Amino acid sequence: MEMQNKLAIYRTHLRKLGCPEVTINSLKHKPEGKSRPAFGIKKPRRSEVNYCPPYPIGESEKSLESVRMELVSDVKKRNNREAVRMKMEKTFAYRRQEVVRDAPMIKDFQARWPALFEVGEINAEFKRITTMPLQSRFLSRLDVHSEKLIRLFKNRGGQIGRRLGGIIAPMDEDDDVDLRRECVIKALCVYLNEDPDNLLREYVAADESLLQESIEETTMGIYVLKHRDASEKPEDIGIVLESQIVMQDLDNVPLAAAMLFGLIYSLNLNYPAELKYTFEVLQKVVMELEGNALSKKAQVLKNRLYQ
């Protein structure tokens, strides 16, 4: 109890000093006209070490906005990656407060911060938020668990077992590591009683109208645009958020899954309800971010993996 009181006093002092992470979570800072004291309270939920950091010393909203405007033009220039990286680093707190405080629409945010929607910058932003690498950790930890996951999939019986068998069957014909990772991710959805079509959908290149219609109905997901000859490499792999294509021309589905996971952190998005267990396992079991508090379904899977 004494420690709890000390922490409460400490947070009060931080609030008086204007610490944004404490101020934004204050019960006194609620939307006008809302009677519920906890309405809209924003808190770090997924091990975000830098959830809502303060501006760098000597910087203000006005000065960082001018840097942001420079970034919009810098990202269009060739061979300018280092300048973009430095300015993205400098404006991290400004961008983060905008995401957490205002929860902007994806379309508006992408127009303001186009540099963020690239593989390198999503990796960098995720590390700024969690202090952990994204792409390398996501793929390597998925590989670590793959063998045991595949064994669990093969041992599952009934209708789900048959469906799992169909998903992982291509791995027996092709030892490509990216195909293996893709099959494991899709099978993980099914194993957790969720539909992988809510995460990943495939289309034939000729069905552009169907693709566009599906994108307009998608809140969050990955699309794969294939040639009529399914044996060829996909024509395009991309990510959709709020009915907008935010990333295209990704190399493979596992990379797209890692980038989608990173965008959820970067944009402070909720996990989609129809995939909440899949993303929970990816976060807490695969990435090992806040892995002590799991739902019953995720805990059962984790126990089986570590038997």
Image (spheres, rainbow, N blue to C red):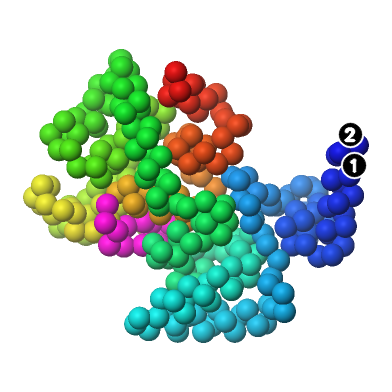
Residue 165 as seen in the image, left or right of residue 199? left
Q: Where is residue 302 in the image (x, y as percent from the top left)?
A: 48, 26
Q: Which residue is drawn at 77% across and 56% down?
A: 22
Furthest toward the left, the residue is 229
Q: Which residue is drawn at 37% across and 84% down?
A: 77
Q: Residue at x 29, y 41 (%)?
A: 182
Which of the 4 quarters of the picture holds residue 95?
A: bottom right
Secondary structure, mark 1, is helix
Look at the image and tell me whether residue 186 can be seen.
Answer: no
| Residue annotated with mark 1 | 5
| Kind of residue sitting beneath label 1 | Asn
Query: For the residues marked 1 and 2, what is the alpha-carbon distance in whole angstroms?
Result: 6 Å
| Kind of residue sitting beneath label 2 | Met
Quadrant for the N terminus in the image: top right
In this view, the residue in front, 289 or 249, is: 289
Residue 158 as seen in the image, left or right of residue 46? left
- Asked whether the residues under the numbered discs 1 and 2 touch, taking CB atoms below 8 Å apart as contact, a structural biologist would say yes
Q: Where is residue 241 in the image (x, y as percent from the top left)?
A: 43, 57
Label placed on residue 33: none
Query: Which residues are the magenta region?
Result: 238-252
Which of the 4 quarters of the picture holds residue 210?
A: bottom left
Instruction: Relative to 196, say whether 17 is above or below.
Output: below
In this view, the residue in front, 285 or 116, is: 285
| Residue annotated with mark 2 | 1
Instruction: Relative to 23, say whether 95 is above or below.
Output: below
Secondary structure, mark 2, is loop
